Image (tube, grey):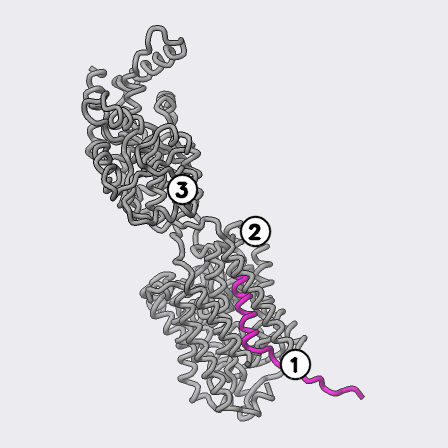
Amino acid sequence: MENKVKKPKNYMNPYLAGILLGMVLLASFYLTGRGLGASGATRSVVVSAVSTIAPTHTANSAYFSKYTKENNPLKSWLVLEIAGVIIGGFISGAYAGRLKLKVEHSPKITPRKRIVMASIGGLLFGFGSQLGRGCTSGAALTGMSVLSLAGFVTMMAIFGTAFALAYFFKNNWI
Amino acid sequence: MGPIVPLLNISNELNLLIAFVIGLGFGVALEQAGFSSSRKLAGMFYGYDTTVLKVFFTASITAMLGLIFLNYVGLIDLDIVYINEYYVYSSIVGGIIMGAGFIIGGFCPGTSFTAISIGKIDALWFILGSMIGIFIFGETYPLWEKLYMSSPLGPVKISTVLGIRDGYFALLLIVVASLMFWVGEMAEKKFKREDITNEI
Amino acid sequence: MNTRVIICIILISFGSIAAILPKENTSSIRLNADQMLHEIRLATNLISPDELADLLINKDPSILLIDVRDSIEYGKFHLPGAINIPLNNLLNDNWIPYIDQISQNNIFYSNGTMLSSEAWIITKQLGFKNNFVLSGGINEWFATIIKPERPTSMAPTEEWALYNKRKASGMFFTGSKASSADEAALSLPPVPRKKKSRVQGGCS
Amino acid sequence: MKHINLLALGGLIILLAVLFGFATLKITGKYKFKRESTEMLEIVSLREHALSIDKVKSHSTDDEYTLIDIRTPKEYMIYHISNSTNIPFDRLLDDDNMDFFNSPKKKIIYGTSSVGANAAWMILTQLGYDNLFILDCDLNDWKLYVDEKNIFSEPPKKNEDPKFDYESIIKETEG
């Protein structure tokens, strides 16, 4: 009865993973001259959805019209990159045996509360990433590697606030 | 002579293919680092797992050193490489909102896609939430337009602001990062959470 | 020796190497010293007064004469159709479109060839295209075109042919038509050279 | 897991080392321009570097200045200004010549024509070298004026001095 659940491999050494991520980022700079990104892809999805539902509305909305210039917002660099991220993550998860449909939450809270927290966090992050012109990978990580002041300021703001509010959401995590 | 795509004006389709391949590498690196688990991500703020700190700073330092050496060798033209424009207030306020979203939601956009790829449902809700957030920003944009556009300083580099050479700043950052790594590992011992680490 | 210590040592060593790398070279300059030396030795940028006379006589529209002397000397005398860019504000913003373009051929000139060749060297380094120098400057222009020496009577026929040709072109430049050419030069708006601009990126 | 980690780490370091090794190998353009074009324009507009024949004549005796002949060794052999050193224009960027230009002594460059000397002066000044001057006349004029001392009543003009009265000649032929 071979149903012993194979224990998933543990994670790669963080420093090594960091160097790997650094190499990917460097390759992106060398090949395309731009770094990594993520929130831009989500925005492209939102823009394409909004413009299919209400094209006139998006045409004259100050913010969205900026991103509907090229015909199909989904055919953008970041959307393809995020498609790669999803498949890359899947491959790595499969290799390490971590593929499992679940809601990861601290034992102290119910999965429902975790989902509510995740969506609120997502809402804040989506809004903040548009205002800050990039998320942790787009503005902070990429920005820091090209020594841009915006990168450092955004990184410090993100991590600083997260540390500051950590106490209030303690029971969500520990 | 990099960057390849703009200088050799490669076709858009090939550029998108490159984007996909880079995304593959990005996804593998993030998942292998363990960024697909929100509790590992949040570990940094509670001390029991400072992976985020280690991976994040090692990655940006590796890329920074890579760019400096490639530039010295003349293999890359840094005038063409994208440098984020700095809009003082929107970077700070945006960062604060993102920080709150990070500690509440447990993900950032990049890691949420990695998490959803291995089956994390909460990451799915995070992404839905972020779509709504972007939609809200788009709709209420006129309210924030002034803040969004205020005090643009252009693609200013931190090394020029500090008046030192890129190489000096890289060394400075590495020393600071090494200290943070050391403190991080100390924190991991102090705030050890056996129950969480075996679970993730 | 856990991996943290190894990684920190490696990064610090590479960081210190990065720190001692010399200052990034002057980014705007495209040619280095060897290439510049080579370009000067080739001297493909020199145009003789005879060649210039032919170009001006058959009204080649792609030519723009640029006088690099100061405005006083330009006021006293300048070649027909020439515009005045004094050498010390050669790189001013309003003149850049004229000297950094691909649609016309600029010919720098001054009394001699010193100022004009200095202007040419600076534009050549910055990667600007189609700039030339009138070799000998106005002095040479006068010595050959405006007041050509009469060859000795026994001189071979080619010398006489050259002398007559120069005498004729001399007449062209001293007749009443000389002044009308001034306005024509400025009418052509130069086509700017396409420079590599910064890639758009990030999430904005 | 530990073993693979270190192995992969070693591989990455070797990659970085190779990249950097390639960096130091890149010797093309060893001597890099240190002065920006705008700075060169300022220096050039001062017109202090072009010395007239008389000035160079007076300097050629005092040992604070050295004369540099940038013509080919053959031309130098046939005729050269007394106690000048020969650095051909093609060999300007050789290492020993570069060290020579590093010396604090004031140096006057001359060639067959002042324009050639001026080009060498431009490159050397942009490479960051200082106290460099040029002899602003053709070597032929120097030979006649200084060595044979007969032809010219007054010293030959600098390259940029007008040799004709342009205005009057034009008016006279037009009239």
The image quadrant where one finds the N terminus of chain A is: bottom right
Tell me: B163 left or right of B121: left
**Label 1 belongs to which residue?**
A9
Q: Position of residue B121 (x, y in %)?
A: 59, 80
Given residues A46 and C76, the one toward you in this image is C76
The amino acid beneath tag 3 is Leu
Query: Which chain is indicated by disc 3?
Result: D
Q: Which mark is residue B11?
A: 2
Identify the secondary structure beneath mark 2. Answer: loop
Q: Which residue is mark 3?
A: D92
Report whether D24 appears left or right of C174.
right
User: Is residue B105 shown left or right of residue B29?
Assistant: left
Instruction: Answer with the quarter of the image where residue B143 lies.
Output: bottom left
Please provide the residue range marked out in magenta. Answer: A1-28
Which of the pair A84/B30 is nearer the observer? B30
| Residue drawn at x 53%, y 50% as measured from the top left | B9
Q: Position of residue A152 (x, y in %)?
A: 40, 71
Q: Residue furthest top?
A: C153
Q: Amino acid at mark 1?
A: Lys
What's the distance in space between the residues labelled 1 and 3, CA to CA? 63 Å
Above or below, comparing residue D121 to residue B166 in the picture: above
